[in-house]
Image: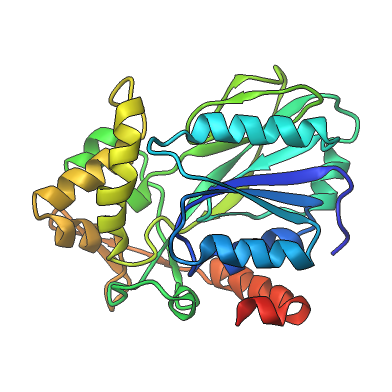
Amino acid sequence: MPVASNLAGVCIVRNARDLIAFVCGHYLRIGLTHIRFIDDGSSDGTYEFLFQLARHEKRVSVAQVNAQEFRQGELMSEAAAELVHRGFAIILPFDVDEFWNISGPLLEDRYARHLEISFSGHWINFVQSRRVTRATPARLLGVKYSAPVLHDANQATVTSFKRPFVCFSTTKIAFKTARPVRLHVGQHSLEMGPQHSDPTRYDIFHLPFRCKDEIAVRALDHEPRRAPLRQHASIAWQSFFFREAYLTSRTDDLWRANSADSDGFLNCGGERIPLAHDYRLRTVLVKAIGYLALRYPRCLL
């Protein structure tokens, strides 16, 4: 696929060694001109992988920070401003478990006549097998279900175990601009940026739970760093919920609600919710790792 001339991605990452090669392969394969990673204190080899890849691939760069608090909105805004200053016009923020289902050159062509515009993607949540307790790259390739979007899945129903988190969907923002912007935490919207928005919504393949053990990581690592910055209960409510579930010994309930049993169902609050067979994320992951392996096999060793 051709490389776009002015499209850049930005991602904050922390301890995602099982997933990071897929992320890099995907966004390079779909044609981004540059991917800027901010490593927020990884200790599992994520930073080392990105540093090594950046030595061989000029479209990848990585900076390392180690903040005690979760400064996602600030760090994302600073990185986006840096990319705009360097001449990149279209900025695609993403989390490490999000795969925008787009083509870079086609996206660039679509907005060629716009000086400034924002656009959005929406989550399609994919679901891991209930048997997977620990994350490995190979186990990611076993994901074969996506969850239905339930319109009554929201903060209240998810946190009361009436609806699975994977049945909740939200939008993420991206934009074209020549000026700095300010992103809200989570990249759901812009605090400052283009006023005009494209109503088109792109798909974002999202894998919120890669394994059962990730619940403990979210509870013990993510939430303590988010809590000091929470101005009201709706900000980063997911990590607060995961921590509460962990501390009240409801990890098994949370995992059953958000993972696929052997028959392809979620089990939440006594209800079995059917999942759809969906191999789109697996296809994206296979193509991504194949792209990287062909070009940079030593980085994968």
The residue shown at (85%, 42%) is: 6
- Which quadrant of the view contains residue 196? top right
- Which quadrant of the view contains residue 108? top right
Q: Compared with residue 297, is residue 160 higher up or lower down, i.e. above or below?
A: above
- Which quadrant of the view contains residue 181? top right
Q: Is residue 41 left or right of residue 48?
A: left
| Quadrant including the N terminus | bottom right
The location of residue 59, given as percent across then percent down, is 79, 56
Q: Is residue 153 visible?
A: no
The residue shown at (50%, 77%) is: 141
Q: Compared with residue 54, is residue 71 higher up or lower down, i.e. above or below?
A: above
The residue shown at (89%, 47%) is: 5
The location of residue 215, given as percent across then percent down, is 27, 57
Q: Is residue 222 left or right of residue 75?
A: left
Q: In front: 44, or 96?
A: 44
Q: Compared with residue 83, is residue 229 higher up or lower down, i.e. above or below?
A: above
Q: Compared with residue 15, is residue 138 higher up or lower down, i.e. above or below?
A: below
Q: In front: 287, or 20?
A: 20
